[in-house]
Image: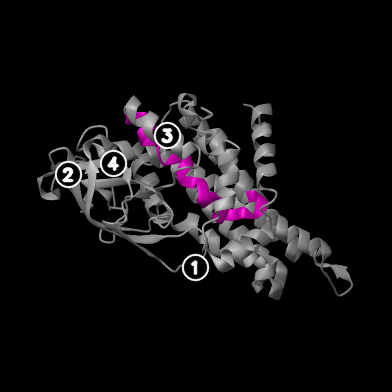
Amino acid sequence: MNFATTPEQEQIRDAVERVCAPFDADYWLRRDRDGGFPEDFHRALADSGWLGIAMPEAYGGAGLGISEAALMMHTIAATGAGLSGASAVHMNIFGLHPVVMFGSDAQKARWLPPLIQGRDKACFGVTEPDAGLNTLKLRTRAVRQGDHYLVHGQKLWISTAQVASKILLLARTTPVEECRGVQGLSLFYTDLDRSSVEVHEIDKLGRKCVDSNQVFIDGLRIPVEDRVGEEGQGFGYILHGLNPERILIASEAVGLGRAALARAAGYANGREVFGRRIGQNQAIQHPLAESWMELEAAQLMVHKAAWLYDQHQPCGAEANAAKYLAAEACYRACERAIFTHGGMGYAKEYHVERYLREAWIPRLAPVSPQLILCFIAEKVLGLPKSY
């Protein structure tokens, strides 16, 4: 088994680092303070062709795998951009995978090039206030009226809806009480028409420059040709995007953890107290060494999950495990980075407090650690379903 990166993957890492270089830690500190979507960062990645890394070549993408996409997202986070930088382009990388898999040739030709080129930004409309992770109980309703659907409902925690021109929307086309199993939900990719959609930003703990929102839909008109695949089969379609999403956010978490670890090691090497560098003290060394090992182990699980996915093999357990392990390792690394800085870790100018705030994101989203544990217990260990 070969754990070495390929020359192509090394080129990807180096090229992405070059694109990210002008967007240094001070840039992301300003974005964290002032908010505002990082348009210049998004445009730089689009102009360099990175937004289509996992999209088909026929539509302007690079046609690479989730392994390469995960490497790209890890690199962005590890440069110090953290989850702010990664989240600015996250949806581009995995979000339209259901369209790639189940959309018609005409739909792909219409939708993918503008997203890859950065002319369109998309948001992902699934989660609802009363459903949470119980996706089969979504109530946003899409009623067909001839050549279009009329949609009413509400979505929650929808990232980039302030700046998005498109939405990948999961809505109910059959009332929940009439459905059996996973049927009754349909998937649409359509214009985010502000005349019938209200977007209210949520003031949140971190990642201020990438907005999260409540979305209120009142009479959104969606043409039938904007429906992805068959009516009522949308839940099955989005499942094909869940494992890539978990793999990517796990890779981003490892990158964020490594950025924090690098800050901590740099500070420990330079800070002197009682006539010696604090990095000489085992109370400083050991937690950081432990975090290095935890991040390395999590990254190996990311690699395994991505490899399985790219080989078209089942990877649900590995993708969920990667997300869980990476999120926990990331959080501990960011926490230890603050402890290493002491009181200055609480100061924004040293960046690590921002990293810790962002480290909550992969722990909470897109699935809770508790539900991952339930999944592993049931699907891997054969224990009774608990929810």
Q: Is the Cβ of the residue at disc 1 closer than 8 Å to that at disc 3?
A: no
The residue tagged 1 is 205
Q: Earlier in the sequence, mark 1 or mark 3?
A: 3
Q: CA separation, marks 1 and 2?
A: 35 Å
The mark closer to the camera, 4 or 2, is: 4
The residue tagged 3 is 112
- Point out residue 317 in the picture as x, y percentages from the top left corner: 42, 40
- Residue 331, visible in the rendered structure: yes
Secondary structure of residue under mark 4 = strand
Q: Which mark is residue 188?
A: 4
Amino acid beneath label 2? Thr
Secondary structure of residue under mark 3 = helix
Colour scheme of the picture = one colour
Quadrant in the picture for the N terminus: top right
The residue tagged 2 is 173
Q: Earlier in the sequence, mark 4 or mark 2?
A: 2
Q: Residues within 10 Å of mark 4 (few under 14, many from 20)?
A: many
Q: Is the Cβ of the residue at disc 4 closer than 8 Å to that at disc 1?
A: no
Q: Earlier in the sequence, mark 2 or mark 3?
A: 3
The mark closer to the camera, 1 or 2, is: 2
- Point out residue 224 in the picture as x, y percentages from the top left corner: 21, 37
